[in-house]
Structure formats: C-alpha cells, structure tokens
Image: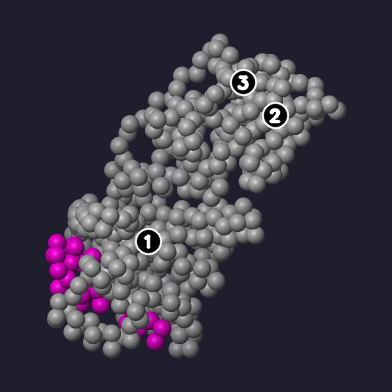
Amino acid sequence: MLSKVHSCAVVGLEGAIVEVEVDYTNGLPGVTIVGLPDAAVQESRERVQTAIKNAGLHFPRHRIVVNLSPAAIRKEGPAYDLPIALGVIILAGHLPQDSIQSAMFIGELSLDGVVRHTRGVLPMAATARANGFKRIFVAESDAGEAALIPDLEVYPVQTLAHLYDHLAGRRFIEPYLAQADALEPIFTPTDFSEIKGQDHVKRALEVAAAGGHNVLMVGSPGAGKTLLARALPGILPEMSIEEALDVTRIFSVADQLPAGTPLIKQRPFRAPHHTISHAGLVGGGNIPKPGEISLAHRGVLFLDEFPEFGSRVLEVMRQPMEDKIVTISRAKGSLTFSANFQLIAAMNPCPCGYYGDSQKPCTCAPAVVTKYQKRISGPMLDRIDIHIEVPRVDYEKLSGNQLGETSETIRQRVQAARDIQHNRFTNHQTTNSQSTDVLCNADMRVGEIRQFCQLQAEGQSLMRAAMSQMNLSARAYHRILKLARTIADLADSAEIQSVHLAEALQYRPKIMLS
C-alpha cells in the first residue's frame, strides 16, 4: 500500500510542491528517506516515530521508504515531519487516503507530537492556493501567517493526535479566521520635531523619502547623523497591503517574523554593523538565504560608519542598487531575491572625525584623510543621489524650546508627492499597455526619465554648465534629473523649474574624494 501526502519546499522566495510518498518493503524495520534531504530532514525519522507512538498510534514494524518528490529539489528543514508522519499513519491503515484530498501539510513535530513553527509558511500557502489546494494544515503559531492568503482554508494544528482525530471525523479542528485589521499607523520612535537644528538635512531627507532616493550624510561625531537616519521611517509613506505581503514573504523565508506578528505592517529599517559579512549583507550560504539588503526591501538600509564596511562588501551592493534585485548563483542553480531598498549611509569625514569642523581641529594628515575618504569608490558614490553635510549644532539651538515640524506633517507632503508619482506611472503603464515595477522617481529608467524629466531652456543651460564644471557622469546626469523631478513633485509643479534643478545640483558631493 502506497500513501501520498502533499507538502511544500521553499526555493528562494517561492514555494515548490513536494509529494511525500511512503511505502514499505521487506527487510529489517527502519525508515529510509530519499529525495535529496538534508540532515534536518533525515533526523525526522526519530521525531516521526516517537511522535506517532506518543499519539497513541501504531508504528508499522516494516522497512519504510519515504520519497520526497521531485528529487531534483533539495529538501531542508523540519517542515516535512507532519506530512511524513501522516503518510506513515495512512500506510498503517489508521486513515483512508481520500481523507487528505486537496490538502497540504506543513509542520515540525516534537517527540510528544506537538506541531511546531516552520519558516516560509507564507510562500508555501501562496503556492498551495496557486496549485489548486483548498486546505492547508500548519502549526497553530503559523496559522495567522498562512491566513494572509485568501481563498484558502487554514487549519491550526496543535498536536499530531489532534490532526488524526480531525481527519478521522472524531474531533474537528475549526478553520482559522483571518483578522481583517488595517495596516497600523506609522510608529515614530524619533520625531523630526525633536531634532534641533539641521533644517537643510531634514529637507534633504524629505526629498529622499518623497522619491526613494539614496542618501549619504557626512559630519563630525555627535552631529546627529544616526538620529536623523532613525527618524526617517516616520516620514515614509505607509505601505500598501501588496507591499506588506511582499516584505512579509521575505521575513518569513528568512525566519525573522516577530512572534505574534503574521504581517509586517511597518517599512523595514535595517541597520547592520560594519563587521557584517558579504553573505550577511547581500545573502548567500550553501543554501542561499536573503541578506540584509533583501530584508530592507520596500524600506531603509542604514549603513553607519560607511567607510568601515569592507570594500568587497560595499562593491557587491552596486548592482542590486541599480537592478533592485540580487541574484545568487551556485553550482546547482541561481536564486533571485528582491532588494528594492533605500540606502541611507553615514560617515565621518576622516578617521578622527573632525576634518572641516568649525570648532575642533582635525589631527589627521592630508594623505590619511584622502585614503579614508577613498574607501568609498567613485562608482558607489555615483549611485547615491543626495550627498549632505551634517554640521555641528549650536548651543542656542540645542538648548532652545522651539520645536520644528512634526514627522506627521512632513509625511503628508511626502505622501502627496508619492501619490503624484503613482498616478504618473500608472497612467504611463495604461497608455503603453505594459507592466512596470516603477513605484517612485528613484526607480525610473532611461525611458521614463526622457518622458517625465524634460527641462526648459533655462534648465538646459544650467544643466549644461553643471555637466562641464562638475564632470558629471551619464549616471549622475540621470540621477540629478530624477532628483529634480522629485523636488518638483514636492512643490506640486508639473514642470521641472530651474530652482528645482538648482536644489538637486546642491546635493552632489563637493569636497569628497578631492
């Protein structure tokens, strides 16, 4: 008698149907698992056997063979415990095969039969629905995550015995009812109104938030670079439900969903330490996993002490910053992870931190300053739209009681500019009858720049002079146009005026890498 139970594997950010086939042959009692399993899957033999016995069911005294099909996909993790156990129970005659029709089973088993959490439930549930499955059985802690996928009955399973009683018609499991909560209001740990001074930096961050542009802040220690960066999420527009699901999928695969939070409702803010490895930042490993740039998808990646990051680590970010995806290639194949993040970097101007400071003299030799600044390559700087100096804050401003604009006030202007961009690109998509992934000005490609960033005669003259005097590359030229388009959107201007272009040119690096 052959039993078949359906489960799912995670390949990159997508799911792949896995058919768990269980049969027995003549020979010494034991369990053999085939189908390219890793060590965690091989160890399920002991977990399954003990869990079945502790559920009060008979474990067949035969040589049992478990095949995880298709064999070409590597199976990893303990998510196959539950389907393997169910296949053995059906093989032993405790349940009929038709009791699991149109159902998928995912879960790790403890020795007493309790069903535990597994990573990647969201893409697995999406795969189940896409392949015509009507029901999915997961751990009770994973039910909220699976229920984010509509038109799919989700059953929270506490124990293997409970699942057996449900399938046998003795004690039914009630389907999980998805919570219809709206996305939460934006949480602002640091409000812009609490940051004294730095008005020009706040303006630069507002422009960056409105268009999704990358930012590099340069200033002496204690000037407020980190504080400003951590306040940025408070002025970013709210995520749509589609963006929230997109982010949640990545966190689910990386097994970084907070407990009791099935849906990521706030834009991610990732701030890795400068000692992070290449694989930790962009993703990788023997079985590739998402890195920090993917976990920052639709959010902010903050790199403090920018020059302290390894040069190889920074250089591998260049292509993802352009393509909005990262592709990790291995001998067995390639995987692609989303990486549409907004880079906010902060650095000191020199090793001692006080080069160009108005009050404290720099103790570094000129050659040391140049060497330190050149840790950031020209091509990397070229991919950063906004370069802003963060000066020391005067005592009068620090001690004053006057508060600036709140993050909510700034966010409303940012949201209005984003709405203009959304309408622009949606109409462009409809007119040209083609799909596009352009969501904000920073995502524009050459075709969109040519269409939406036209300059008037005065602007053309200003741009020609800037190209000559500042030795701008073609990439920098396009980035200035995109930045000027964002500034015009904030001003609710249909045309890019010369004043908008002039402000965009002010955000180019001035003394860096001299």
Q: Which labelled disc corresponds to residue 97? A: 3
Q: Is residue 495 magenta?
A: yes
Secondary structure at numbered mark 3 = helix
Residue 28 coordinates in the image, percent (x, y): 86, 28
Tell me which residue sits at (69%, 35%) in the image. Answer: 67
Where is mark 1, residue-wise? 342
The residue lying at 64 percent from left, 25 percent from top is: 86
Categorize mark 3 by other alpha carbons within 10 Å: few (<14), some (14-19), many (20+).
some
In the current view of this chain or complex, which residue is farthest to the top? 170
The residue segment tinted magenta is 485-514
* Label 1 neighbour load within 10 Å: few <14, some 14-19, many 20+: many
Q: State left or right for residue 247 relative to residue 104.
A: left
Q: CA distance from mark 2 to mark 1?
A: 48 Å
Q: Which mark is residue 22?
A: 2
Q: Quadrant of residue 510?
A: bottom left
Count numbered badges in the picture: 3
